[in-house]
């Protein structure tokens, strides 16, 4: 099987196929997680927003896949996250009742998915004092408590993709970056080596097109409707501190919210817009000022001191590869994934959510196996742990820095041990940053990083803050010269 695209879906397809015993090659024109998969909200969520549009099936799928990630496949990369909706004066009581019904339904979905309540407790109405303890910067006037529920949070979306790809490679898949597909058919692909410049034809029994927002450029007959999701990056101190994810309803838009997600680094990701994209698809989408202003306005209305444009340390945008279903607004387009087969046998998978990547991959491989009559067993990925995974009790007992455990799981001691030969690798790559040299060397030796961009923008996420990226670039270039394979 040939897989085109190494975002979260393509990496998931490679893993699912390899775990069934198939011979697999997966290619990407750039790097792991180069496209949409690194521009997400860094959440594994239960799909509450889909209940507002009666998308119970999509919501249940999200809740089920969230539980699988939290408990089986990636406990090291995920954690529970408290979520607060403040019941403020600008939140109509009808909206509050709708939200309360939604999070109560989320409790039912969590139970149906089998996620333990000790990991994700049931939702509750909380007092004004408890609401302010979790979100101290809230506007106090008219505050009448809040709603508290629990969801899942990723340490980092690009690290999830890397772990999936490495797990697939451990099962025999060939993971090949910097390899552009020039043309595609059901039994072959013409590809170009973007580093060396040569071309070759790959012959294969089956092809899965998982190229995301570029999928329609490889196969005729697919009409995508990309939607832009913009996030802001701020510092928690500029929001008055944040001990939970803050959820703020968008006025006059039922079921739509802006949220602020705290990170262990002290940064906060604020999102999310949902705007249709016209014209060519950019490799790295630029967030427009209109999106930034919208997010600041909604968030600022909930806080005692509204954040300013000058406090936005960065912004990023990703494009969702939604299948055009004829609806007027991209926000209304279904988030259910689709698996399509072309006349010559190429299987294309589009749509969906980062949380549901595993189910998307399973469905795509099922379709390819069925259409091409391949000898393969059922999917194993529901119970297959990713590289670094272990129980939470085992992870808590590891002798390694907590930050490394959150990012590498049981491999954290081996990552830290790289400093035994070169003690300087234990130091931050630049003053004031928490990324250390061992992480960059590990990325070069074990995670397929080839360039400074790979190191700073995807294996670590220093690139999310331009000033941090610039400070770390000299160290990345130095280690690339010293340790590149």
Image (cartoon, rainbow, N blue to C red):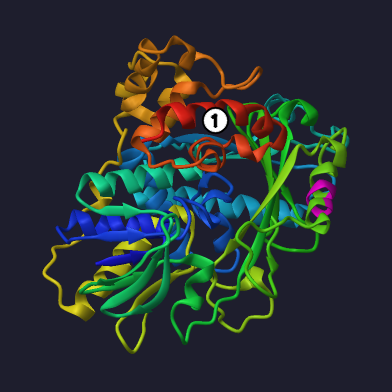
Any magenta on residue 295? yes
Any magenta on residue 188? no
Q: Looking at the image, which residue is at 65% across and 17% down?
A: 431
Query: In the orientation shown, which residue stands out farthest toward the front?
Result: 197
30 with respect to 27 (left or right): right
**Relative to the observer, which residue lies in front, 417 or 120?**
417
Query: In the orientation shown, which residue stands out farthest toward the bottom?
Result: 343
Q: Which residues are magenta?
A: 293-297
Q: Looking at the image, which residue is at 56% across and 79% down?
A: 324
The quadrant holding residue 387 is top left
Q: Looking at the image, which residue is at 54% across and 24% down?
A: 435
Q: Is residue 230 above or below residue 211?
A: above
**Relative to the observer, which residue lies in front, 30 or 330?**
30
State the residue position of label 1.
476
The quadrant holding residue 19 is bottom left
**Relative to the observer, which residue lies in front, 249 or 454?**
454
Q: Is residue 408 above or below residue 280?
A: above
Q: Is residue 26 above or below residue 143?
A: below
């Amino acid at each position: 099987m040939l897989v085109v695209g190494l975002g979260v879906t393509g990496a998931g397809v490679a893993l699912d196929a390899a775990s069934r015993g198939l011979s697999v090659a997966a290619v990407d024109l750039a790097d792991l997680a180069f496209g949409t998969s690194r521009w997400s909200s860094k959440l594994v969520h239960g799909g509450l927003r889909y209940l507002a549009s009666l998308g119970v099936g999509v919501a249940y799928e999200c809740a089920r896949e969230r539980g699988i990630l939290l408990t089986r496949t990636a406990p090291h990369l995920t954690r529970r996250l408290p979520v607060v909706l403040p019941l403020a004066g600008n939140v109509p009581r009808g909206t509050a009742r709708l939200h309360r019904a939604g999070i109560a339904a989320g409790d039912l979905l969590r139970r149906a998915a089998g996620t333990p309540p000790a990991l994700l407790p049931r939702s509750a109405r909380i007092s004004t004092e408890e609401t302010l303890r979790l979100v101290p910067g809230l506007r106090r006037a008219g505050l009448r408590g809040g709603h508290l529920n629990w969801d899942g949070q990723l340490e980092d979306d690009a690290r999830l993709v890397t772990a999936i790809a490495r797990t697939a490679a451990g099962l025999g898949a060939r993971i090949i970056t910097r390899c552009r597909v020039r043309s595609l058919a059901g039994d072959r692909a013409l590809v170009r080596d973007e580093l060396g410049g040569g071309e070759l034809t790959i012959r294969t029994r089956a092809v899965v097109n998982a190229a995301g927002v570029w999928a329609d450029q490889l196969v005729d007959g697919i009409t995508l409707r990309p939607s832009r999701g913009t996030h802001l990056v701020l510092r928690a101190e500029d929001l008055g501190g944040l001990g939970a994810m803050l959820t703020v309803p968008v006025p006059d838009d039922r079921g739509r919210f802006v949220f602020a997600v705290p990170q262990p680094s002290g940064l906060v990701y604020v999102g999310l817009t949902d705007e249709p994209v016209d014209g060519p698809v950019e490799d790295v989408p630029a967030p427009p000022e209109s999106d930034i202003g919208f997010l600041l306005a909604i968030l600022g209305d909930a806080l005692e001191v509204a954040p300013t444009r000058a406090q936005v340390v960065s912004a990023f945008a990703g494009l969702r590869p939604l299948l055009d279903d004829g609806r007027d607004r991209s926000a209304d387009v279904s988030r259910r994934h689709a698996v399509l087969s072309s006349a010559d046998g190429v299987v294309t998978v589009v749509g969906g959510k980062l949380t549901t990547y595993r189910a998307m991959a399973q469905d795509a491989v099922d379709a390819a196996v069925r259409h091409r009559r391949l000898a393969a067993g059922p999917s194993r990925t529901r119970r297959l742990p990713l590289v670094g995974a272990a129980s939470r009790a085992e992870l808590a007992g590891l002798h390694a820095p907590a930050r490394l455990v959150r990012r590498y799981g049981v491999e954290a001691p081996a990552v830290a041990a790289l400093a035994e030969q070169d003690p300087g690798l234990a130091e931050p790559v630049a003053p004031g940053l928490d990324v250390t040299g061992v992480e960059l060397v590990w990325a070069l030796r074990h995670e397929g990083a080839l360039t400074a961009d790979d190191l700073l923008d995807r294996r670590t996420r220093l690139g999310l803050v331009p000033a941090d990226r610039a400070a770390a670039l000299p160290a990345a270039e130095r280690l690339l010269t010293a340790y590149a394979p």
